[in-house]
């Protein structure tokens, strides 16, 4: 919609709105007289409350002394002098009028004036603040973001109680005019990083914006790199921690997940419990997560390579068991592993998309029945099924890298099954090259893991005690970009 200014005639403005929204039953208009001047209130009843508007504004206007100066004087009085809680900026064009109405505000149109006065009378149905569903932690705040942008900003500001927190609300270039908010600490976040991120977000033009993840592909420098360009969280506490590191948080209206930029590989293995637990235990758990990621990606491929190309690396007793299992199945190890992995992914997807009342039954019973039946029929061997199940469970230890783990796993199985040791080495080098070649906004994606140094021990592969972490303080602007 073009920036078309409001008409001076009240009837003309109402006629235009009637043309746009007249067929919508939730569009509400009410003509009234204020200080002897014809006016009209416009709103959407599902987003705004007429009762709230009358109780808050119109009753107060009736008790105010008569305003002088005609329509312009009434508009100036409401914007600058009246006790009525009106928005500070006047509505001057039809695009702004439609956006404000869609955001749940009520607008007062005055005859003979090319400006409107907006009132904050939102009364939208909303989901209450609940506990996080996808980020399990035993300690720390148990609040999660919701779908309302202003609520999410308030949750973040309640955790980040400083005047340096900046929240820039903008409208995305979408047909739905979806709002998003760029949050950062003005003293910690590098200015060049924030400026670059702001410009990239402004250039994004997509038909619809339903999730903050839609922005991620536009932030990537290398589109073929499978590692994520940003991290996601539904916890305001996690977003607050990233703000303290000098990073930016992007919130999108209608999305309960925050986008964190820039993101590093090591952050996918961190959680709030790491910093609430002791340093030794937290370091052990973090190492286990790294091992789980390696098992999820390379475990099935390593099994296929060892059985098909390098059986001499397998102990004799274990090799005997594996040979007995493979002898009873008609498929070669690579196809067998691919089929079992695909089957487990289908079961997981079915359990995820099924109605919640039967999702657990579908995933659990489906995996047990199909696995037992396939083994009993001799279609797949027990060692293959065991390895595929272990890799699937290990994937859940690092849920934020689930997509990458699945894609890498299939690639490793195919390369290791076709070319053996060289194929497995090629897959590993390709994955490492992707990680090393990713530079989100000029920062090393593998920081602080590579190159190994004091930072990798302080808060990388393991974490140090809080007395040392508090002294150094991890801020991205303090290490070389």
Image: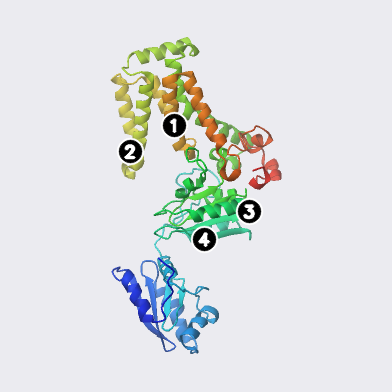
Q: Position of residue 452 (x, y in %)?
A: 65, 32
Closer to the camera in the image, 119 or 447: 447
**Cα separation between marks 2 and 1:** 16 Å
**Cα separation between marks 1 and 3:** 41 Å
Direction from residue 475 to residue 122 in the image, left or right: left
One can see residue 300 in this view: no
The residue pinned by badge 4 equals: 169
Residue 393's disc number: 1
CB-based contact (under 8 Å), mark 1 and mark 4: no
Circle 3 SS class: helix
Q: Position of residue 258 (x, y in %)?
A: 50, 51
Specify the quadrant of the image occupied by residue 116: bottom left
The residue pinned by badge 2 equals: 350
Residue 191's disc number: 3
- Disc number lying in front (1 or 3): 3
Closer to the camera in the image, 343 or 179: 179
Say few, some or many: other residues with alpha carbon within 10 Å of mark 2 (under 14 / 14 to 19 / 20 or more).
some
Closer to the camera in the image, 271 or 22: 22
**Cα separation between marks 3 and 2:** 45 Å
């Amino acid at each position: 919609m073009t920036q078309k200014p409001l008409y001076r005639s009240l009837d003309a403005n109402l006629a235009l709105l009637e043309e746009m929204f007249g067929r919508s039953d939730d569009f509400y208009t009410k003509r009234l007289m204020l200080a002897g001047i014809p006016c009209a209130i416009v709103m959407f009843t599902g987003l705004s409350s007429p009762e709230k508007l009358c109780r808050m504004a119109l009753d107060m206007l009736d008790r105010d002394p008569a305003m002088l100066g005609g329509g312009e004087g009434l508009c100036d009085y409401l914007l600058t002098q009246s006790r009525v809680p009106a928005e500070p900026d006047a509505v001057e064009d039809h695009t702004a009028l439609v956006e404000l109405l869609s955001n749940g505000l009520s607008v007062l149109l005055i005859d003979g004036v090319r400006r409107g006065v907006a009132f904050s009378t939102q009364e939208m149905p909303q989901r209450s603040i609940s506990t996080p569903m996808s980020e399990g932690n035993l300690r720390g705040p148990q609040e999660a973001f919701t779908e309302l942008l202003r609520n999410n900003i308030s949750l973040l500001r309640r955790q980040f109680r400083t005047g340096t927190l900046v929240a820039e609300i903008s409208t995305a270039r979408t047909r739905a005019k979806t709002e998003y908010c760029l949050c950062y600490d003005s003293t910690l976040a590098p200015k060049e990083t924030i400026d670059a991120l702001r410009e990239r977000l402004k250039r994004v033009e997509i038909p619809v914006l339903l999730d903050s993840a839609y922005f991620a592909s536009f932030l990537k420098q290398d589109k073929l790199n499978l590692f994520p360009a940003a991290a996601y969280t539904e916890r305001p506490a996690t977003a607050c921690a990233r703000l303290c590191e000098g990073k930016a948080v992007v919130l999108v209206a209608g999305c309960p997940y925050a986008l964190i930029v820039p993101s590093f590989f090591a952050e996918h293995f961190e959680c709030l419990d790491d910093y609430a637990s002791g340093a030794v235990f937290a370091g052990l758990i973090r190492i286990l997560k790294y091992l789980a990621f390696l098992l999820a990606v390379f475990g099935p491929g390593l099994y296929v390579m060892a059985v098909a190309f390098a059986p001499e690396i397998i102990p004799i007793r274990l090799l005997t068991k594996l040979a007995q299992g493979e002898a009873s199945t008609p498929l070669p190890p690579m196809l067998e592993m691919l089929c079992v992995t695909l089957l487990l992914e289908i079961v997981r997807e079915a359990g995820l998309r099924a109605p919640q009342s039967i999702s657990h039954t579908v995933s659990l019973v489906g995996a047990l029945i199909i696995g037992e039946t396939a083994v009993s029929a001799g279609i797949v061997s027990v060692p293959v099924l065991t390895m595929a199940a272990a890799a699937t469970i290990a994937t859940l230890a690092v849920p934020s890298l689930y997509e990458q783990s699945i894609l890498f796993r299939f690639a490793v199985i195919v390369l290791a099954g076709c070319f053996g040791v060289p194929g497995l080495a090629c897959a590993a080098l390709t994955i490492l090259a992707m990680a090393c070649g990713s530079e989100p906004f000029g920062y090393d994606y593998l920081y602080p893991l590579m190159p190994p140094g004091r930072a990798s021990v302080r808060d990388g592969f393991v974490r140090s005690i809080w007395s040392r972490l508090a002294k150094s303080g991890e801020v991205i602007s303090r290490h070389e970009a």
